[in-house]
Image (cartoon, rainbow, N blue to C red):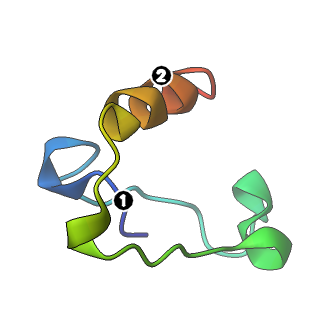
Amino acid sequence: VRNSWAKYYGDDGYIRIVRGAHDCGIATDAAVALVAAEEEVPGARERAMQEAAKWD
């Protein structure tokens, strides 16, 4: 699965999830967000990383 933090996070920008194991609810709750680059919000990356760290 490609992550949203580019190649600097995970396995060169990807994470591995066991197929068929319903890990992380990915089979029923997958989502994607599309954000235009020109609409960058100051501090958004840092907040996203802090939230992601809660799940580790």
Q: Which of the 4 image quarters holds residue 9? A: top left
Towards the viewer: 32 or 55: 32
Q: Residue furthest right?
A: 28
User: Residue 22: percent from the left, percent from the top?
Assistant: 79, 65
In the image: residue 35, left or right of residue 14: right
12 up-or-down from 48: above or below = below
**What residue is shown at x 46% (from left), y 37% (from top)?**
48
**What residue is shown at x 71% (from left), y 68% (from top)?**
26
Q: Which quadrant is home to the C terminus? A: top right
Q: Which residue is mark 2?
A: 50
Towards the viewer: 26 or 35: 35
User: Residue 12: percent from the left, percent from the top?
Assistant: 15, 54
Task: Check disc 2: other Cα within 10 Å, few if <14, some if 14-19, many if 20+.
Answer: few
**What residue is shown at x 22% (from left), y 70% (from top)?**
37
30 up-or-down from 49: above or below = below
User: Residue 55: percent from the left, percent from the top?
Assistant: 63, 28
Separation of residues labelled 2 and 1 (CA atoms): 14 Å
Task: Check disc 1: other Cα within 10 Å, few if <14, some if 14-19, many if 20+.
Answer: some
In the image: residue 20, left or right of residue 5: right
Q: Secondary structure at mark 2?
A: helix
User: Residue 10: percent from the left, percent from the top?
Assistant: 29, 44
> Amino acid under label 2?
Gln
Query: Which disc number belongs to residue 4?
Result: 1
> Amino acid under label 1?
Ser
